[in-house]
Image (spheres, rainbow, N blue to C red):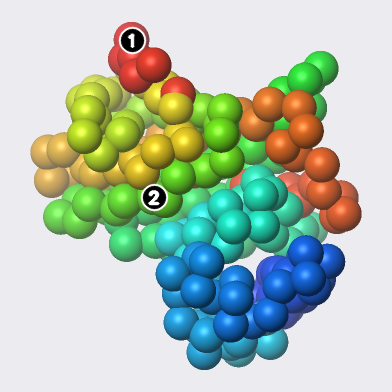
Amino acid sequence: MAKLFAVEVGRRVRTLRRLYGLSLTELAHRASIGKATLSGLETGTRNPTLETLYAISAQLDVPLAVLLADPDPPGRPEEIHGAAVSATLLETFADRDVTSELYRIRIRPGVVQVSPPHQPGVTEHVTVFSGSARVGPTGQPVLVPAGSHAHWPADVPHLYAADNGVEVHALLTIHHRSGESATPFPPAAGIGSLEAS
């Protein structure tokens, strides 16, 4: 992750934390992350994982895209890594009462990544282009082969895994209903009934 990107992500986290009147200790506790991890993230000296950013965004009640910095240089968005998923925020867009984040993702084989719950009403939609993914709520994931799609409520713990030992390439769209996407930052350039099709 580029240094300028990490510094900007940290600035956004720190600004929101202060806006909500939370101490470092309180936000770290609520997000179940170490205080040193949060401090390093805010100062830009520590690169966050997807899991860390999702945990923070859930506690600040904002979409993940609010924490991500605009690409630097423009046109070259940063890839954020989790245990199994690498994600690149491609775009955020609003349509009436829904704001959406669009990510290009890769799911590496051999590891299962569990994402913490998002805000109430948030849904995730995955379209798989290559490989075969197991995604959805941790208690009820579905298998999504290449050329197929699945969506689920993302306000519960949910997982991502490559199913057959081959890296998965997919698009992930996260939908936030109105009121859940109001933010003090401009959108950055960016991981529901469970169904597969």
Depth check: 46 or 20 in front?
20
Residue at the image point whose x is 34% and y is 19% from the top: 194
Pointer 1 or 2: first along the chain: 2
Q: Is residue 168 above or below residue 67?
A: above
Crowdedness near tag 1: few (<14), some (14–19) or many (≥20) residues, C-alpha within 10 Å: few
* Amino acid at pointer 2: Ser
Q: Nearer the viewer, mark 1 or mark 2?
A: 2
Residue type indicated by callout 1 = Ser
Q: Is residue 26 above or below residue 183?
A: below
Relative to 46, residue 152 above or below: above
Horizontal side of residue 93 vs 137, given as left or right: right
Res. 120 image quadrant: top right
Secondary structure beneath label 1: loop
Please name the residue shown 60% across and 72% down the image: 27
Label 2: which residue? 115
Name the one closer to the observer, 100 or 145. 100
Q: Position of residue 42 (x, y in %)?
A: 67, 81
Q: Which residue is mark 1?
A: 197
Residue 177 percent coordinates (x, y): 68, 26
Q: Residue at x 78, y 64 (%)?
A: 20
Residue 168, how many percent across, how many down? 30, 40
- The residue most toward the left is 164
